[in-house]
Structures are given as C-alpha cells and as structure tokens.
Amino acid sequence: MITINKPIVVISKCLEFDSCRYDAQLITNKYIRILKEYINFIPICPEVEIGLGIPRDPIHIISNKEGNTLYQPSTKRDIGKLMYDFSDNFIDSLDQVDGFILKSRSPSCAISTAKKFPNISEKQSMGNGPGLFTEKVIESFPDHPMEEDKRLNDIFLREHFYTAIFTLSDFRNVKDFKSLYDFQGRHKLLFMTYNQTKMRKLGQIASNNDSKPLEDVLVEYYNILLKLFKRRPNYLSNINTQMHAFGYYKRELNSNEKIYFLEILDDYRSKKVPISAINTVLTSWNVRFQNKYLLNQSYFKPFPEGLIENKESRMK
C-alpha cells in the first residue's frame, strides 16, 4: 500500500527506548526495533511520570469491590489515584493515535497480563487483567489496535496489527468525498476479507446517499473501520480472497506455477507460513501481468515490505 503517513503508536518506553523498567532494564524486541523506521512512536513510562524512580520497588494491582488501585508494599503507598490522574491527562493530550504497543505483565501498561491481588497482604494473585494506565486507554480507545510486546513474536498477530495500524494511518489522507471513495476502493479486498458485513456498511457510508456533512461521514466511517479490525479474519476468508485473485491468472500461468501456488496455500492453511508469503507471490503476478485492479488493492501489500521477514519459523 502507499501512504504518506507513518502510523502514530503509543508505546511503553521500556520497549527499545529507555532503561526505565522497575529494575532499570531496557526490554529489547527486534520487531519494535525495525518498526522505528516506519512508525512515529510516542514512548511513555507511566510509572516514571508519576514520580517513581529508576530503579524502583515493585508495585501491585489491588482489585476488589472498591475498585482497582496500585500499591507499593515497600513504602505502603497507594498510588492508584496518581496513576489514574496521569493517565487521563496523557490521553487528553493525544491529538491522533493509530495504535498501542504496551509492556506485558506490567501493573501499569499490560493489556491483559498484569497480576491482580485481592488485598495488600495477599501474595497469591487472583487473576490477570489490564494495568491501570491501560485500563484508562481501553476506556478511551476501546476499538483501537493494541498489542503487548510479547505477542508481536507471533507472526499472525503481528501482521494483523501491522495491517490495522497502516490502514488507519492511510485513512488520515482522506480529506474529501473523492479521497474517501478512493480509499474504499483501494481497500475493498482487504475489507471484504476481514468482514463482508462491515465492508458493505463502509461502502454505504462512503456513498453518502443521505447527503450528510463530510465531517459526520468521516466520523461514522472511521468508527466502523476501527471495529472492522477488532478481529483477525479467519484463514478461510483469506483463502477465498487469494483464490479470487488467483482466478485472474489461471490462463496465463503454467502448470508448475499453479501447483506451487496451491502448495503454498496449503502451507498457509496449516499455519506453516503467514499471509504475506502468499501475497508476495500474488503481487509478483499482479506486476507481471499488470492487472490494474489488483495492483491498486492494499490487500496484497497492507504494510511496508521492509516489515516482512524472509524467513519465518513455523507456528508453535
């Protein structure tokens, strides 16, 4: 896909940006390191921002009928209100954002893996959930793409996240009804693969048969677009789209090329290769046969080629 905008992504500062973790460590992640070239990151460490030092004593989430808070056993401080107030102020300061990459298991930043304790004396956690900072993020951005750092190691989750944030950043190029119409057309196969019902809804909104003001149309369209990316498309939806594209070239391809494509499609079905492996083949045919319709479709290149690894390990 072609976009002049880099995605804007809020990220936990300890991930490849600063040694600000509680133990003064920097968390390395090769995927985030590569992403720095393609994304405008907004690094943030909520715990440092509320005055906790580096290094610092651990903090825990206390969750009970009175609500959630953060407690530091060594100082016996309740810092839940500090964290909530900072989070609200930070969120209010955001102008635009396309997604979030947050630290797993962090009592401030985790999306779903932070340990929760029923009281200050209990040492056995009662389950997992979001950190207090992320709790506020989810309240304000319930449908935005969000991933914890460790989940980026899964290529299927990673490519879904990339697809979402780069498509959302491309939407920021939409300034009028013509560019909205072009956006809808360019992403048609992608939207069809993710959710055909929402694809049709987006098409209806873009057609603007009710002659609504542009601003209202864009807000309505964007809200549905966010929801479209809430779930990854299942493998059958992708295979249907890929077979649809393959159908354009059945007469041009030789038997060996057809066999190769069907074999790699089986590998995708078995989760041995990611979607990008198949789309690379289809893209080469789009270029070779100069199919203008398919060349214009973001489905085959939903994010920059530099983010595609040439060699991927099989799914565990």
Image (cartoon, rainbow, N blue to C red):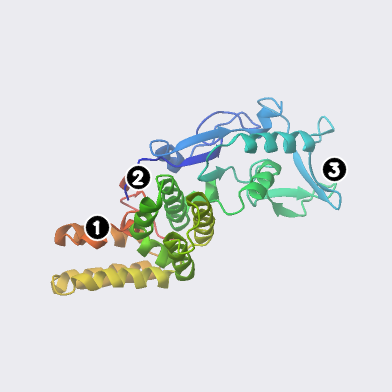
Q: Which mark is residue 255?
A: none
Residue visible at 64% across and 42% down in the picture = 109
Decide if residue 29 is on the left or right side of residue 122.
Answer: left
Is 31 situated above or below 129?
above
Which disc number belongs to residue 120?
A: 3
Name the residue furthest front: 211
- Disc 2 crowd rating (10 Å Cα; few below 14, some 14-19, many 20+) is some
Left/right of residue 250 with respect to residue 28 in the rendered view: left
Q: Secondary structure at mark 2?
A: loop
What amino acid is labelled 2 in the image?
Thr
Res. 68 visible in picture: yes
Question: Image quarter for residue 257?
Answer: bottom left
The answer to which of marks 1 and 3 sits earlier in the sequence is 3
Of the two numbered discs 2 and 3 on the same chain, state the one appearing first in sequence: 2
Q: Mark 1 or mark 3, which is nearer to you?
A: 1
Mark 1–mark 3 Cα distance, whole angstroms, equals 59 Å
Reading the image, the residue beneath label 2 is: 3
Q: Position of residue 241 (x, y in %)?
A: 34, 69
Q: Position of residue 140 (x, y in %)?
A: 64, 47
**Residue placed under numbered mark 1 in the picture:** 295
CA separation in Å, label 1 and label 2? 15 Å
* Mark 1 crowdedness (10 Å alpha carbons): few <14, some 14-19, many ≥20: many
Q: Is residue 69 above or below residue 275?
A: above
Q: Residue at x 30, y 51 (%)?
A: 310
Residue found 15% across the figure and 70% down from its top:
253
Which residue corresponds to the image point at 50% horizontal and 41% vertical from the top-left? Answer: 9
Q: Is residue 79 above or below residue 115?
A: above
Q: Earlier in the sequence, mark 1 or mark 2?
A: 2
How crowded pointer 3 is (Cα within 10 Å; few <14, some 14-19, many 20+) is rated as some
Label 2 to label 3: alpha-carbon separation: 49 Å
